[in-house]
Image (cartoon, rainbow, N blue to C red):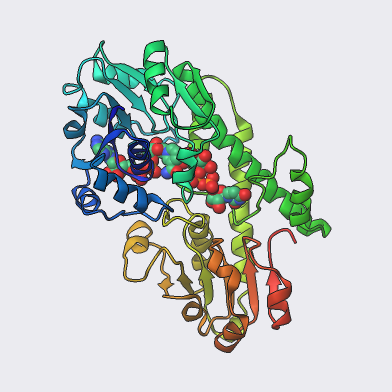
Amino acid sequence: MASIAIIGTGYVGLTTGACFSHLGHDVICADVDADKIARLQAGEVPIVEKGLDRLVDEGIRSGKLRFVVGAANAAKDCEFHYLCVPTPQAADGAADLSYLEAAAAEIASVLPNNSVVVNKSTVPVGSTRVVARVLGRSDVAVVSNPEFLREGTAVSDFLQPDRVVIGSRDQEAAIRVAALYSRIAAPIMVTDPVSAETIKYASNAFLASKLSFVNAIATLCEAVGADVNDVVLGMGYDTRIGREFLRPGPGWGGSCFPKDTKALARIAEDAGYDFHFLDEVLRVNEDQFDRTAKKVIDSVDPSLNGHVAVLGLTFKAGTDDLRDSPSIEVLKRVVAAGIPVTAYDPAVLPRENRLSQMYPELDIELATDPYAAADGAASLAILTEWDEFAWLDFDKLAEVMRGRNIVDARNLLDPTIPRRRGFNYRGVGR
Ligand code: NAD
Ligand code: UGA
Protein backbone atom coordinates (compact mmCIF):
# COMPACT_ATOMS: atom_id res chain seq x y z
CA MET A 1 0.00 0.00 0.00
CA ALA A 2 1.21 3.51 -0.81
CA SER A 3 1.65 6.73 1.15
CA ILE A 4 -0.39 9.58 -0.30
CA ALA A 5 -0.39 13.31 0.50
CA ILE A 6 -3.54 15.22 -0.41
CA ILE A 7 -2.90 18.94 -0.91
CA GLY A 8 -6.21 20.79 -0.53
CA THR A 9 -8.85 19.12 1.65
CA GLY A 10 -12.05 20.38 0.01
CA TYR A 11 -14.84 18.49 -1.76
CA VAL A 12 -12.39 16.65 -4.03
CA GLY A 13 -9.39 16.39 -1.70
CA LEU A 14 -11.29 15.11 1.33
CA THR A 15 -13.22 12.58 -0.75
CA THR A 16 -10.03 11.40 -2.49
CA GLY A 17 -8.15 11.13 0.81
CA ALA A 18 -10.94 9.31 2.67
CA CYS A 19 -11.52 6.91 -0.24
CA PHE A 20 -7.82 6.14 -0.71
CA SER A 21 -7.51 5.39 3.02
CA HIS A 22 -10.60 3.17 2.75
CA LEU A 23 -8.78 1.31 -0.05
CA GLY A 24 -5.89 0.67 2.38
CA HIS A 25 -3.42 3.46 1.58
CA ASP A 26 -1.77 5.69 4.20
CA VAL A 27 -3.11 9.18 3.61
CA ILE A 28 -2.22 12.61 5.00
CA CYS A 29 -4.56 15.44 4.00
CA ALA A 30 -3.21 18.99 4.16
CA ASP A 31 -4.93 22.33 3.96
CA VAL A 32 -4.10 26.00 4.56
CA ASP A 33 -7.32 26.35 6.54
CA ALA A 34 -6.28 25.56 10.12
CA ASP A 35 -9.87 25.62 11.37
CA LYS A 36 -10.95 23.03 8.78
CA ILE A 37 -8.03 20.77 9.74
CA ALA A 38 -8.82 21.07 13.46
CA ARG A 39 -12.41 20.02 12.81
CA LEU A 40 -11.29 17.08 10.68
CA GLN A 41 -8.75 15.98 13.31
CA ALA A 42 -11.69 15.88 15.73
CA GLY A 43 -13.58 13.67 13.27
CA GLU A 44 -15.99 16.42 12.14
CA VAL A 45 -16.62 16.50 8.38
CA PRO A 46 -17.13 20.15 7.39
CA ILE A 47 -19.20 19.46 4.24
CA VAL A 48 -22.44 17.65 3.45
CA GLU A 49 -21.45 14.56 1.43
CA LYS A 50 -23.21 11.21 1.73
CA GLY A 51 -21.07 8.49 3.31
CA LEU A 52 -18.02 10.72 3.81
CA ASP A 53 -18.27 10.96 7.60
CA ARG A 54 -18.26 7.16 7.88
CA LEU A 55 -15.07 6.89 5.78
CA VAL A 56 -13.35 9.73 7.66
CA ASP A 57 -14.23 8.10 10.98
CA GLU A 58 -12.97 4.72 9.71
CA GLY A 59 -9.71 6.31 8.48
CA ILE A 60 -9.04 8.17 11.72
CA ARG A 61 -9.70 5.04 13.80
CA SER A 62 -7.45 2.84 11.66
CA GLY A 63 -4.72 5.51 11.65
CA LYS A 64 -4.69 5.48 7.84
CA LEU A 65 -6.12 8.98 7.50
CA ARG A 66 -4.45 11.98 9.11
CA PHE A 67 -4.83 15.75 8.75
CA VAL A 68 -2.18 18.48 8.92
CA VAL A 69 -1.93 22.19 8.26
CA GLY A 70 0.46 23.04 5.43
CA ALA A 71 1.21 21.16 2.22
CA ALA A 72 4.89 20.59 3.00
CA ASN A 73 4.02 18.85 6.30
CA ALA A 74 2.08 16.22 4.37
CA ALA A 75 4.36 15.97 1.35
CA LYS A 76 7.66 15.35 3.13
CA ASP A 77 6.81 11.74 4.03
CA CYS A 78 4.80 10.56 1.03
CA GLU A 79 5.38 8.85 -2.29
CA PHE A 80 2.33 10.35 -4.08
CA HIS A 81 1.15 13.97 -3.86
CA TYR A 82 -2.37 14.77 -5.05
CA LEU A 83 -2.97 18.43 -5.87
CA CYS A 84 -6.66 19.11 -5.15
CA VAL A 85 -6.60 22.90 -4.79
CA PRO A 86 -9.11 25.32 -6.35
CA THR A 87 -8.78 26.45 -9.97
CA PRO A 88 -11.39 29.22 -10.03
CA GLN A 89 -12.25 31.37 -12.98
CA ALA A 90 -9.93 34.33 -13.47
CA ALA A 91 -11.26 37.73 -14.59
CA ASP A 92 -10.49 36.93 -18.24
CA GLY A 93 -12.47 33.62 -18.19
CA ALA A 94 -9.35 31.44 -18.05
CA ALA A 95 -8.63 29.13 -15.11
CA ASP A 96 -6.65 30.79 -12.33
CA LEU A 97 -3.61 28.58 -11.68
CA SER A 98 -2.22 30.59 -8.77
CA TYR A 99 -3.35 28.09 -6.08
CA LEU A 100 -1.85 25.22 -8.04
CA GLU A 101 1.44 26.99 -8.57
CA ALA A 102 1.59 28.06 -4.91
CA ALA A 103 0.94 24.49 -3.72
CA ALA A 104 3.61 23.11 -6.08
CA ALA A 105 6.10 25.74 -4.87
CA GLU A 106 5.38 24.85 -1.23
CA ILE A 107 6.15 21.14 -1.66
CA ALA A 108 8.97 21.34 -4.24
CA SER A 109 11.90 21.20 -1.84
CA VAL A 110 10.51 18.56 0.54
CA LEU A 111 9.37 15.94 -1.98
CA PRO A 112 11.13 12.61 -1.38
CA ASN A 113 13.23 11.35 -4.30
CA ASN A 114 11.30 9.69 -7.13
CA SER A 115 7.92 10.62 -5.76
CA VAL A 116 4.99 11.39 -8.07
CA VAL A 117 2.96 14.61 -8.10
CA VAL A 118 -0.58 14.02 -9.35
CA ASN A 119 -2.77 16.80 -10.62
CA LYS A 120 -6.41 16.18 -9.67
CA SER A 121 -7.53 19.80 -9.87
CA THR A 122 -9.25 20.66 -13.14
CA VAL A 123 -6.59 22.50 -15.07
CA PRO A 124 -6.12 23.86 -18.58
CA VAL A 125 -4.26 21.96 -21.20
CA GLY A 126 -0.53 22.18 -20.53
CA SER A 127 -0.79 22.63 -16.74
CA THR A 128 1.08 19.40 -16.02
CA ARG A 129 4.07 21.13 -17.61
CA VAL A 130 3.43 24.26 -15.50
CA VAL A 131 3.52 22.16 -12.30
CA ALA A 132 6.70 20.38 -13.43
CA ARG A 133 8.35 23.75 -14.13
CA VAL A 134 7.38 25.14 -10.70
CA LEU A 135 8.63 21.97 -8.97
CA GLY A 136 11.93 22.04 -10.85
CA ARG A 137 12.61 18.44 -9.83
CA SER A 138 13.84 16.14 -12.60
CA ASP A 139 13.47 13.10 -10.28
CA VAL A 140 9.75 13.78 -9.68
CA ALA A 141 7.16 12.80 -12.27
CA VAL A 142 4.04 14.95 -12.75
CA VAL A 143 0.92 13.05 -13.80
CA SER A 144 -2.57 14.23 -14.67
CA ASN A 145 -5.41 12.26 -13.03
CA PRO A 146 -8.58 14.33 -13.47
CA GLU A 147 -11.55 13.75 -11.17
CA PHE A 148 -15.09 13.07 -12.41
CA LEU A 149 -16.96 12.80 -9.10
CA ARG A 150 -20.23 14.68 -8.53
CA GLU A 151 -21.03 16.41 -5.28
CA GLY A 152 -23.71 14.58 -3.33
CA THR A 153 -22.55 11.21 -4.67
CA ALA A 154 -18.81 11.90 -4.39
CA VAL A 155 -17.91 8.79 -2.36
CA SER A 156 -19.73 6.31 -4.59
CA ASP A 157 -18.49 8.11 -7.72
CA PHE A 158 -14.90 7.81 -6.48
CA LEU A 159 -15.17 4.16 -5.44
CA GLN A 160 -17.28 3.07 -8.44
CA PRO A 161 -16.17 5.41 -11.24
CA ASP A 162 -17.06 4.97 -14.91
CA ARG A 163 -13.37 5.31 -15.68
CA VAL A 164 -10.02 6.43 -14.27
CA VAL A 165 -8.02 8.67 -16.61
CA ILE A 166 -4.27 8.99 -16.21
CA GLY A 167 -2.21 11.37 -18.34
CA SER A 168 1.53 10.83 -18.33
CA ARG A 169 4.45 10.64 -20.71
CA ASP A 170 6.32 8.59 -18.11
CA GLN A 171 4.99 5.04 -18.38
CA GLU A 172 6.42 3.90 -15.05
CA ALA A 173 4.78 6.82 -13.21
CA ALA A 174 1.46 6.07 -14.95
CA ILE A 175 1.61 2.44 -13.84
CA ARG A 176 2.41 3.51 -10.25
CA VAL A 177 -0.62 5.86 -10.20
CA ALA A 178 -2.84 3.19 -11.82
CA ALA A 179 -1.81 0.75 -9.06
CA LEU A 180 -3.35 3.08 -6.45
CA TYR A 181 -6.73 2.18 -7.99
CA SER A 182 -6.09 -1.58 -8.16
CA ARG A 183 -8.99 -2.33 -5.79
CA ILE A 184 -11.41 -0.33 -7.93
CA ALA A 185 -13.28 -2.12 -10.71
CA ALA A 186 -13.22 0.41 -13.55
CA PRO A 187 -11.49 0.85 -16.89
CA ILE A 188 -8.18 2.66 -16.44
CA MET A 189 -7.20 4.73 -19.43
CA VAL A 190 -3.64 5.96 -19.84
CA THR A 191 -2.98 8.76 -22.27
CA ASP A 192 -0.73 11.81 -22.60
CA PRO A 193 -1.26 14.72 -20.12
CA VAL A 194 -2.73 17.12 -22.70
CA SER A 195 -5.35 14.55 -23.74
CA ALA A 196 -6.19 13.76 -20.08
CA GLU A 197 -6.68 17.46 -19.35
CA THR A 198 -8.84 17.82 -22.47
CA ILE A 199 -10.97 14.77 -21.50
CA LYS A 200 -11.89 16.49 -18.23
CA TYR A 201 -12.99 19.79 -19.82
CA ALA A 202 -14.67 18.09 -22.77
CA SER A 203 -16.69 15.85 -20.42
CA ASN A 204 -17.94 18.74 -18.29
CA ALA A 205 -18.70 20.95 -21.29
CA PHE A 206 -20.52 18.07 -23.03
CA LEU A 207 -22.71 17.46 -19.97
CA ALA A 208 -23.42 21.20 -19.68
CA SER A 209 -24.35 21.24 -23.40
CA LYS A 210 -26.70 18.30 -22.86
CA LEU A 211 -28.43 20.25 -20.08
CA SER A 212 -28.73 23.45 -22.12
CA PHE A 213 -30.21 21.33 -24.92
CA VAL A 214 -32.73 19.69 -22.64
CA ASN A 215 -33.70 23.04 -21.08
CA ALA A 216 -34.22 24.44 -24.59
CA ILE A 217 -36.38 21.40 -25.42
CA ALA A 218 -38.38 22.09 -22.23
CA THR A 219 -39.05 25.63 -23.46
CA LEU A 220 -40.14 24.22 -26.81
CA CYS A 221 -42.42 21.75 -25.01
CA GLU A 222 -44.14 24.63 -23.21
CA ALA A 223 -44.63 26.40 -26.56
CA VAL A 224 -46.08 23.38 -28.40
CA GLY A 225 -47.91 21.75 -25.49
CA ALA A 226 -45.70 18.65 -25.14
CA ASP A 227 -44.67 17.11 -21.79
CA VAL A 228 -40.88 17.27 -21.43
CA ASN A 229 -40.87 14.39 -18.94
CA ASP A 230 -42.31 12.09 -21.59
CA VAL A 231 -40.08 13.60 -24.27
CA VAL A 232 -36.85 12.91 -22.36
CA LEU A 233 -38.09 9.46 -21.33
CA GLY A 234 -38.67 8.66 -24.98
CA MET A 235 -35.30 10.10 -25.97
CA GLY A 236 -33.46 8.29 -23.17
CA TYR A 237 -34.52 4.82 -24.33
CA ASP A 238 -32.13 5.37 -27.24
CA THR A 239 -28.85 4.04 -25.85
CA ARG A 240 -26.92 6.49 -28.04
CA ILE A 241 -28.58 9.34 -26.12
CA GLY A 242 -28.76 7.68 -22.68
CA ARG A 243 -31.14 8.37 -19.80
CA GLU A 244 -28.80 10.37 -17.58
CA PHE A 245 -28.57 14.14 -17.45
CA LEU A 246 -31.87 14.82 -19.16
CA ARG A 247 -33.72 16.47 -16.27
CA PRO A 248 -34.72 20.04 -17.12
CA GLY A 249 -34.31 22.60 -14.36
CA PRO A 250 -33.84 26.27 -13.50
CA GLY A 251 -30.52 26.26 -15.41
CA TRP A 252 -27.37 24.38 -14.52
CA GLY A 253 -24.66 25.53 -12.13
CA GLY A 254 -22.26 24.46 -9.41
CA SER A 255 -18.61 25.06 -8.73
CA CYS A 256 -17.44 23.48 -11.98
CA PHE A 257 -19.75 23.50 -15.04
CA PRO A 258 -19.88 27.31 -15.43
CA LYS A 259 -16.17 27.89 -14.88
CA ASP A 260 -15.05 24.84 -16.86
CA THR A 261 -17.28 25.61 -19.86
CA LYS A 262 -15.92 29.16 -19.95
CA ALA A 263 -12.36 27.91 -19.46
CA LEU A 264 -12.70 25.46 -22.38
CA ALA A 265 -13.94 28.28 -24.64
CA ARG A 266 -10.90 30.27 -23.56
CA ILE A 267 -8.51 27.34 -24.12
CA ALA A 268 -9.91 27.00 -27.65
CA GLU A 269 -9.59 30.72 -28.29
CA ASP A 270 -5.95 30.68 -27.13
CA ALA A 271 -5.36 27.76 -29.50
CA GLY A 272 -6.86 29.70 -32.42
CA TYR A 273 -10.27 27.99 -32.55
CA ASP A 274 -13.49 29.93 -32.02
CA PHE A 275 -15.60 27.41 -30.03
CA HIS A 276 -18.74 29.57 -30.39
CA PHE A 277 -20.92 26.51 -29.76
CA LEU A 278 -19.99 26.87 -26.07
CA ASP A 279 -20.99 30.56 -26.04
CA GLU A 280 -24.46 29.47 -27.10
CA VAL A 281 -24.55 26.72 -24.43
CA LEU A 282 -23.81 29.40 -21.82
CA ARG A 283 -26.31 31.86 -23.33
CA VAL A 284 -29.11 29.25 -23.28
CA ASN A 285 -28.33 28.73 -19.59
CA GLU A 286 -28.59 32.46 -18.83
CA ASP A 287 -31.93 32.44 -20.71
CA GLN A 288 -33.08 29.59 -18.49
CA PHE A 289 -32.26 31.58 -15.32
CA ASP A 290 -34.21 34.53 -16.78
CA ARG A 291 -37.15 32.34 -17.75
CA THR A 292 -37.30 30.66 -14.33
CA ALA A 293 -37.06 34.03 -12.56
CA LYS A 294 -39.91 35.37 -14.70
CA LYS A 295 -42.09 32.40 -13.72
CA VAL A 296 -41.36 33.08 -10.04
CA ILE A 297 -42.00 36.83 -10.41
CA ASP A 298 -45.25 36.19 -12.32
CA SER A 299 -46.40 33.77 -9.60
CA VAL A 300 -46.62 36.59 -7.05
CA ASP A 301 -49.95 38.42 -7.00
CA PRO A 302 -48.94 41.89 -5.68
CA SER A 303 -52.42 42.44 -4.20
CA LEU A 304 -51.70 39.67 -1.65
CA ASN A 305 -48.87 41.72 -0.20
CA GLY A 306 -46.80 38.58 0.46
CA HIS A 307 -43.35 37.22 -0.25
CA VAL A 308 -42.28 34.24 -2.35
CA ALA A 309 -41.36 31.16 -0.33
CA VAL A 310 -38.34 29.52 -1.95
CA LEU A 311 -37.43 25.91 -1.32
CA GLY A 312 -33.79 25.09 -2.14
CA LEU A 313 -30.67 27.24 -2.37
CA THR A 314 -27.84 24.78 -3.06
CA PHE A 315 -26.85 24.10 -6.68
CA LYS A 316 -28.41 20.63 -6.49
CA ALA A 317 -29.72 18.28 -3.80
CA GLY A 318 -27.38 16.29 -1.57
CA THR A 319 -24.77 19.03 -1.13
CA ASP A 320 -24.38 22.18 0.97
CA ASP A 321 -22.46 23.87 -1.88
CA LEU A 322 -23.81 27.30 -2.83
CA ARG A 323 -21.12 28.13 -5.40
CA ASP A 324 -22.69 29.27 -8.70
CA SER A 325 -26.05 27.86 -7.65
CA PRO A 326 -28.84 28.22 -10.26
CA SER A 327 -31.19 28.92 -7.35
CA ILE A 328 -29.09 31.94 -6.36
CA GLU A 329 -28.94 33.12 -10.00
CA VAL A 330 -32.75 33.00 -10.15
CA LEU A 331 -33.11 34.74 -6.76
CA LYS A 332 -30.80 37.59 -7.77
CA ARG A 333 -33.28 38.35 -10.56
CA VAL A 334 -36.35 37.92 -8.33
CA VAL A 335 -34.93 40.20 -5.62
CA ALA A 336 -33.94 42.77 -8.28
CA ALA A 337 -37.60 42.80 -9.35
CA GLY A 338 -38.49 43.97 -5.84
CA ILE A 339 -40.05 40.70 -4.63
CA PRO A 340 -39.33 39.77 -0.99
CA VAL A 341 -38.00 36.21 -0.52
CA THR A 342 -38.01 33.82 2.43
CA ALA A 343 -36.06 30.66 1.69
CA TYR A 344 -35.57 27.27 3.27
CA ASP A 345 -32.81 24.79 2.45
CA PRO A 346 -32.01 21.76 4.62
CA ALA A 347 -28.26 22.35 4.12
CA VAL A 348 -28.27 26.14 4.65
CA LEU A 349 -29.40 26.93 8.18
CA PRO A 350 -30.37 30.43 9.34
CA ARG A 351 -27.80 30.38 12.16
CA GLU A 352 -24.97 29.96 9.62
CA ASN A 353 -23.73 33.12 7.92
CA ARG A 354 -22.60 31.27 4.80
CA LEU A 355 -25.22 32.67 2.45
CA SER A 356 -24.71 36.29 3.48
CA GLN A 357 -20.93 35.88 3.38
CA MET A 358 -20.96 34.46 -0.15
CA TYR A 359 -23.75 36.64 -1.51
CA PRO A 360 -23.86 39.83 0.63
CA GLU A 361 -25.90 41.60 -2.05
CA LEU A 362 -28.70 39.00 -1.86
CA ASP A 363 -31.21 40.33 0.66
CA ILE A 364 -33.40 37.33 1.60
CA GLU A 365 -34.77 35.85 4.83
CA LEU A 366 -33.91 32.28 5.85
CA ALA A 367 -36.43 29.96 7.50
CA THR A 368 -36.01 26.73 9.47
CA ASP A 369 -38.58 24.62 7.57
CA PRO A 370 -40.75 24.80 4.44
CA TYR A 371 -43.90 25.80 6.34
CA ALA A 372 -42.16 28.63 8.19
CA ALA A 373 -40.87 29.88 4.80
CA ALA A 374 -44.40 29.63 3.37
CA ASP A 375 -46.08 31.45 6.25
CA GLY A 376 -47.86 34.45 4.68
CA ALA A 377 -46.39 33.75 1.22
CA ALA A 378 -48.05 34.86 -2.00
CA SER A 379 -46.45 31.93 -3.86
CA LEU A 380 -44.02 29.05 -3.47
CA ALA A 381 -41.09 28.09 -5.72
CA ILE A 382 -39.05 24.86 -5.63
CA LEU A 383 -35.58 25.64 -6.98
CA THR A 384 -33.51 22.68 -5.68
CA GLU A 385 -34.73 19.08 -5.85
CA TRP A 386 -34.30 18.02 -2.19
CA ASP A 387 -36.28 14.84 -1.64
CA GLU A 388 -38.18 16.29 1.34
CA PHE A 389 -39.82 18.84 -0.99
CA ALA A 390 -41.48 15.99 -2.89
CA TRP A 391 -43.50 15.18 0.24
CA LEU A 392 -44.93 18.58 1.16
CA ASP A 393 -48.18 18.70 3.11
CA PHE A 394 -50.36 20.87 0.85
CA ASP A 395 -53.16 21.13 3.41
CA LYS A 396 -50.67 22.67 5.81
CA LEU A 397 -49.33 24.96 3.07
CA ALA A 398 -52.88 26.06 2.18
CA GLU A 399 -53.43 27.02 5.83
CA VAL A 400 -50.35 29.25 6.06
CA MET A 401 -50.03 30.71 2.53
CA ARG A 402 -51.91 33.75 1.25
CA GLY A 403 -51.66 32.73 -2.43
CA ARG A 404 -52.06 29.42 -4.27
CA ASN A 405 -49.35 29.55 -6.96
CA ILE A 406 -46.53 27.01 -7.08
CA VAL A 407 -43.53 27.10 -9.42
CA ASP A 408 -41.69 23.78 -9.56
CA ALA A 409 -38.46 24.56 -11.40
CA ARG A 410 -37.23 20.95 -10.95
CA ASN A 411 -40.40 19.05 -11.95
CA LEU A 412 -40.16 17.40 -8.56
CA LEU A 413 -43.89 17.21 -7.80
CA ASP A 414 -46.69 15.18 -9.28
CA PRO A 415 -48.83 18.18 -10.41
CA THR A 416 -52.10 16.37 -9.64
CA ILE A 417 -51.37 16.45 -5.89
CA PRO A 418 -51.12 20.25 -5.39
CA ARG A 419 -53.88 20.81 -7.97
CA ARG A 420 -56.24 18.54 -6.02
CA ARG A 421 -55.61 20.81 -3.00
CA GLY A 422 -56.55 23.93 -5.00
CA PHE A 423 -53.05 25.09 -5.97
CA ASN A 424 -52.06 26.38 -9.42
CA TYR A 425 -49.00 24.41 -10.54
CA ARG A 426 -46.34 25.48 -13.05
CA GLY A 427 -43.41 23.17 -13.79
CA VAL A 428 -40.75 23.16 -16.53
CA GLY A 429 -41.70 22.03 -20.03
CA ARG A 430 -45.05 20.54 -19.03
P1 NAD B 1 -12.58 23.35 -2.57
O1 NAD B 1 -12.56 24.83 -2.58
O2 NAD B 1 -13.71 22.63 -1.92
O3 NAD B 1 -11.24 22.82 -1.85
C1 NAD B 1 -9.96 23.29 -2.12
C2 NAD B 1 -9.17 23.30 -0.82
O4 NAD B 1 -7.80 23.61 -1.13
C3 NAD B 1 -9.64 24.33 0.19
O5 NAD B 1 -9.93 23.70 1.41
C4 NAD B 1 -8.44 25.29 0.32
O6 NAD B 1 -8.30 25.85 1.60
C5 NAD B 1 -7.29 24.36 -0.03
N1 NAD B 1 -6.04 24.99 -0.44
C6 NAD B 1 -5.85 26.07 -1.25
N2 NAD B 1 -4.53 26.31 -1.40
C7 NAD B 1 -3.88 25.37 -0.68
C8 NAD B 1 -2.50 25.09 -0.45
N3 NAD B 1 -1.51 25.84 -0.97
N4 NAD B 1 -2.18 24.06 0.37
C9 NAD B 1 -3.15 23.29 0.94
N5 NAD B 1 -4.47 23.52 0.74
C10 NAD B 1 -4.82 24.53 -0.06
O7 NAD B 1 -12.42 22.91 -4.08
P2 NAD B 1 -12.98 21.56 -4.78
O8 NAD B 1 -14.42 21.74 -5.10
O9 NAD B 1 -12.53 20.39 -4.00
O10 NAD B 1 -12.20 21.63 -6.18
C11 NAD B 1 -10.81 21.41 -6.26
C12 NAD B 1 -10.44 21.16 -7.72
O11 NAD B 1 -11.08 19.97 -8.17
C13 NAD B 1 -10.87 22.25 -8.68
O12 NAD B 1 -9.92 22.35 -9.71
C14 NAD B 1 -12.17 21.72 -9.25
O13 NAD B 1 -12.44 22.25 -10.54
C15 NAD B 1 -11.88 20.24 -9.33
N6 NAD B 1 -13.06 19.37 -9.27
C16 NAD B 1 -14.07 19.65 -8.39
C17 NAD B 1 -15.16 18.78 -8.31
C18 NAD B 1 -16.31 19.07 -7.39
O14 NAD B 1 -17.34 18.40 -7.52
N7 NAD B 1 -16.20 19.99 -6.45
C19 NAD B 1 -15.19 17.62 -9.10
C20 NAD B 1 -14.12 17.36 -9.97
C21 NAD B 1 -13.06 18.24 -10.04
C1 UGA C 1 -20.18 17.88 -12.32
C2 UGA C 1 -19.96 16.61 -13.16
O1 UGA C 1 -21.18 15.85 -13.22
C3 UGA C 1 -18.85 15.75 -12.56
O2 UGA C 1 -18.60 14.63 -13.40
C4 UGA C 1 -17.58 16.60 -12.44
O3 UGA C 1 -16.55 15.87 -11.81
C5 UGA C 1 -17.88 17.83 -11.62
O4 UGA C 1 -18.96 18.58 -12.25
C6 UGA C 1 -16.71 18.77 -11.55
O5 UGA C 1 -15.87 18.79 -12.41
O6 UGA C 1 -16.75 19.50 -10.57
P1 UGA C 1 -21.39 18.45 -10.03
O7 UGA C 1 -21.07 19.86 -10.38
O8 UGA C 1 -21.09 17.97 -8.67
O9 UGA C 1 -20.63 17.46 -11.04
O10 UGA C 1 -22.95 18.22 -10.24
P2 UGA C 1 -23.89 17.65 -11.40
O11 UGA C 1 -24.66 16.53 -10.87
O12 UGA C 1 -23.16 17.43 -12.66
O13 UGA C 1 -24.89 18.87 -11.60
C7 UGA C 1 -24.47 20.10 -12.18
C8 UGA C 1 -25.66 20.99 -12.41
O14 UGA C 1 -26.51 20.45 -13.42
C9 UGA C 1 -26.53 21.18 -11.18
O15 UGA C 1 -26.99 22.52 -11.10
C10 UGA C 1 -27.68 20.22 -11.43
O16 UGA C 1 -28.86 20.57 -10.76
C11 UGA C 1 -27.82 20.33 -12.92
N1 UGA C 1 -28.48 19.14 -13.54
C12 UGA C 1 -27.87 17.94 -13.53
C13 UGA C 1 -29.72 19.29 -14.14
O17 UGA C 1 -30.29 20.40 -14.17
N2 UGA C 1 -30.30 18.19 -14.74
C14 UGA C 1 -29.70 16.98 -14.74
O18 UGA C 1 -30.29 16.02 -15.32
C15 UGA C 1 -28.46 16.84 -14.13
Q: Position of residue 323 (x, y in %)?
A: 42, 51
Res 171 → quadrant: top left
How many numbered marks have been drawn onto this rendered protein structure?
Answer: 0
Residue 348 picture location, percent across and down = 40, 64
**Residue placed at 69% from the left, 60% from the top?**
428
Q: Is residue 208 visible?
A: yes
Q: Looking at this view, is 127 or 298 the one in front?
A: 127
In screen coordinates, is 412 left or right of 90?
A: right
Q: Quadrant of residue 21?
A: top left
281 left or right, relative to 144: right
For the residue pair 295 and 213, the one nearer the viewer reads as 213
Q: Is residue 170 visible?
A: no
Residue 106 position by quadrant:
top left
Horizontal placement of 196 versus 393: left or right?
left
Quadrant where the image shows the C terminus: bottom right
426 over 54 or under it: above or below: below
Work out whether 382 lies above or below 157: below
* Residue at (43, 70) in percent of width and height: 364
